[in-house]
Amino acid sequence: MFYSITGTLVTTEINAAIVDNNGIAFYMTVSAKTHAKLSPKRGEKITLFTYLNVREDGLDLFGFYTQEELNTFKLLITISGVGPKAALSILSQMTPEQFAVAVGTGDTKAIAKAKGLGAKTAARIILELKDKLAKQLAEDDSPADSAAELLPGRDNLSEAMNALLVLGYTRAEATAVLKTVDTTLPLEDMITAALKKLMK
């Protein structure tokens, strides 16, 4: 229903932001990461990407500072046992880039650090997302565009490819941008550099 909301940041509360758009104030639940970026911007014009969660007893509007954060949230809530609250807890603990790296490397401990999340749920998240990635790669199997052929023997490149897919980019987009990134960078820096190019 809402893709994004642009307006004046009225104030922030714990895990929430209130944005005034033409006299209508929208209350949005946000992650700790988004909250930290918004706090210095009170009274300024901002844009938040949004997700409207429909429940039997009400509506919840979530706000995200970046498109990647929204994409990661939407991906997380498709997983069995992971609702909006748990998804937001993960995004409060780690950036979308860090989450994508954790999935790509199977780092359950990093994801399990999120408040209210156990090791079993973290393991399920990684298992289900890796399965989805495997299916996506199988459905679009083009040897000429494989991450391995971009730079043979570079595990980081394959993991960066998986991370970009986790963040919602297509295999073609990920392959093209990774050809322009310094592959000697640490994995998270490589992903960040790729995202900056994709968002231009």
Image (tube, rainbow, N blue to C red):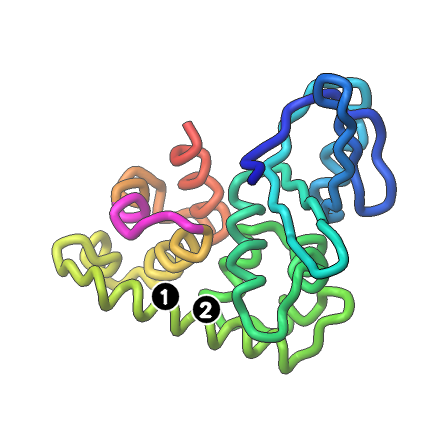
Residue occupying image coordinates x 78% and y 28%: 25
Say which residue label 1 marks. 133
Q: Residue 37's spot in the image, x, y percent?
A: 72, 35
Say which residue label 2 marks. 129
Number of residues whose C-alpha sits closer than 10 Å to that of mark 1, classed few (under 14), some (14–19) or many (20 or more): some
Q: Is residue 78 above or below residue 199?
A: below
Quadrant assignment for the C terminus: top left
The disc labelled 1 sits on which kind of residue? Leu
Label 1 to label 2, Cα distance in Å?
6 Å
Q: Secondary structure at mark 2?
A: helix
Q: Secondary structure at mark 1?
A: helix
**110 on left or right of 23:** left
Q: Residue 117's spot in the image, x, y percent?
A: 71, 72
The disc labelled 2 sits on which kind of residue? Leu
The answer to whether mark 1 and mark 2 are in CB contact below 8 A is: yes
Number of residues whose C-alpha sits closer than 10 Å to that of mark 2, classed few (under 14), some (14–19) or many (20 or more): many
Q: Residue 109's spot in the image, x, y percent?
A: 64, 73
Magenta stretch contains residue 174: yes
* Magenta highlight range: 168-175
**Prevailing secondary structure of the magenta residues:** helix
Pick the residue in front: 51 or 168: 51
Q: Is residue 115 above or below residue 183?
A: below
Q: Is residue 136 above or below residue 120?
A: above
Residue occupying image coordinates x 76% and y 25%: 24
Q: Residue 168's spot in the image, x, y percent?
A: 42, 50
Magenta stretch contains residue 57: no
